[in-house]
Image (spheres, rainbow, N blue to C red):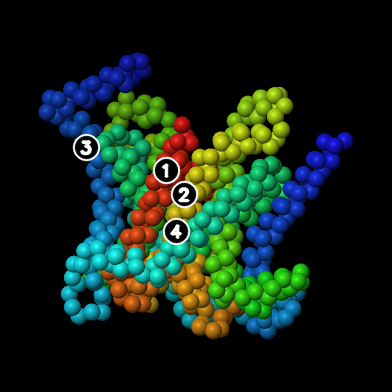
Amino acid sequence: MTRRKTWTVGNVAYWVGFALFFVFTLFPLVWVGLMAFKTPVDIFAVPPKIFFSPTMDNFRKVLSQGDFLNYYRNTFIIAAGAVALTLLVGTPAAYVLARQEFRFKEDLAFTFLSFRFAPELAVIIPLFVIFQRLNLYDNYLGLILIYQSITLPLLIWLMRGYFEDVPKDIEQAAKVDGAGWWEIFTRISIPLVLPGIAASVVLAFIFSWNALIFGLVLGGRETYPVTIALLGYMGYQNVDWGPMAAATLITIIPEFVLALFVLRSLVRGLTFGAVHGG
Amino acid sequence: MGSTGTPGAGERTSSDRDAAIVSGGGSAWGVRQHYLPYLALVPALIVLLGLIIPFVIGVYWSLTDYKLTSSLPKAFIGLANYQDLFTNPVFWNSVRVTLTYVVLVLLIELPLGLAVALMLNRDNPVVRFFRAVLILPLMMPPVVGALMWKSMMTPDGILNFLLGRVGAGPFQWLGSLSLALPSILLIDIWLYTPFAALVILAGLQSLPREPFEAAMVDGASPWTAFHSLTLPMLLPFLIIVGTFRGIDSLKIFDLIYATTQGGPVDATNSLAIQAYFEAIRWTNFGTAMTYSIILWALCYGLAFYFIRRWRKAMQ
């Protein structure tokens, strides 16, 4: 009898806690989602309105006025370029770090990783001056290069783990058959880790898409990413909430769709390969 | 090379290869086999060098009086910038703000993440749906999370309205000296507790069953099992969460830049924010780099601490 009672109390506590955190997580998303479809009058209505007649004005405003679409395109070029370069440069490195033994191997791997944890400003304040001298300031190539500090540590550490997951016997068998190192890498290992590559690419793209500080310091009118455009909706005193909410939705929905494809590798990716599964 | 199908085939090929190298590379194959892997590292090393060189230049700048807008050439001044900062209340305020933030993030997000992970550690449609929802904050730009909350934290906003219904507030949120940092902390909790929860949940799901069954047989209470079995086994996962959240909180920039920009007055003026404004607003590149290097040292120290804890926990 008592056992059953405590079980019930526990269960009630469980669902109350669950509901509280669920509302806490979901409410801002729903609220700002609704805001995107409100007129200024409805946004500032007191008491706040849950039911209102939706309008597409905010979306129209975002897409027609200002340079939002330019910023959107900038973000895409920078993120896609950064991921492509990282894939090219990082995949062979990850394979070597997974399969070869050499001195200072772990030190090298951790040096790559250290750029995930170092303060970005320690690198980009000097680059602010260096890039201006090299004509890389406010330049796609310059930003793609510095975005390597987001994408390269992620890809190397994730892909290294995925390569290590490939059974050595398979590669050994190919070696016995006379395949060279490059042949084994491209013909056997790469196809086996394709799902891992997909997960790394998607996450690297999302992290690049989300970055702010690199574009803020090293970008300019021509190359500002979308995160800076969003800040542009805040004036000194008044904020253009409706268009800001609409722009927010346009910014994050592609990311959510992309994330759906890598749900199973998400925790592994978010922890740079330290945690599998989840 | 070598015949296939015999058990010793693998060994024989490798000794063949060694022989080829010893004999001065009679076949180029063996030599290439040894050097190609390292050649494959070269492109990544070049990129790495491209990141390290600016950093080294920046370390040098922190030892100079470099001011971008000054017509005088920069002069080497040794550790004077560091000495200046250590006697500057602005610096110590930034240290206080930053460390307070880190400590509060860890003290709140770790236990809360653990609680949420425990709630999610069962399988039914509601829980599965919630797990998917939790991913949303993690995928969005932190700037977006900050702006979403900022829109709810206005004086006439929805948060004050809802709290007014239960008799609390109204609060000034980001505009208040005392509440600005807690408000940003609230946004941080919303954005990143899902990270803690999902990592810890992955840990919970990887736990072996046997010790728990044995404890049940021995009549251990659920609390004892949690305290003496679950928590110690989760430790590596808690340390990973601590590492990521701890260091990212030390570097906190995006959330503050999008909300208060360090204000009101200097209530949210973190080290990264101060470094940014020293460089971009005041063009004091020497001082800005000094801030950045001190922040870098703090990050390095924290990472070092966590990695040691992690190695110990894995043993």
**Comes first in the chain, label 3 or label 2:** 3
Residue beneath label 3, please?
B35
Question: Marks 3/1: CA distance?
Answer: 32 Å
Q: In what element is the residue under mark 2?
A: helix
Same chain for the residues under marks 1 and 4 in the image: yes
First in sequence, mark 3 or 1: give its number: 3
Mark closest to the chain's N terminus, 3 or 4: 3
Q: Nearer the viewer, residue B296 or A198?
A: B296
Give the amino acid type for the residue marked by disc 4 in the picture.
Answer: Leu
> Compared with residue A120, is residue B163 higher up or lower down, i.e. above or below?
below
Q: Are marks 2 and 4 in contact (CB under 8 Å)?
A: no
Identify residue for label 2.
B243
Can I make out residue B182 in this image?
yes
- Residue at the disc numbered 1: B307
Residue B250, numbered circle? 4
Front residue of this view, candidates B46 and B257: B257
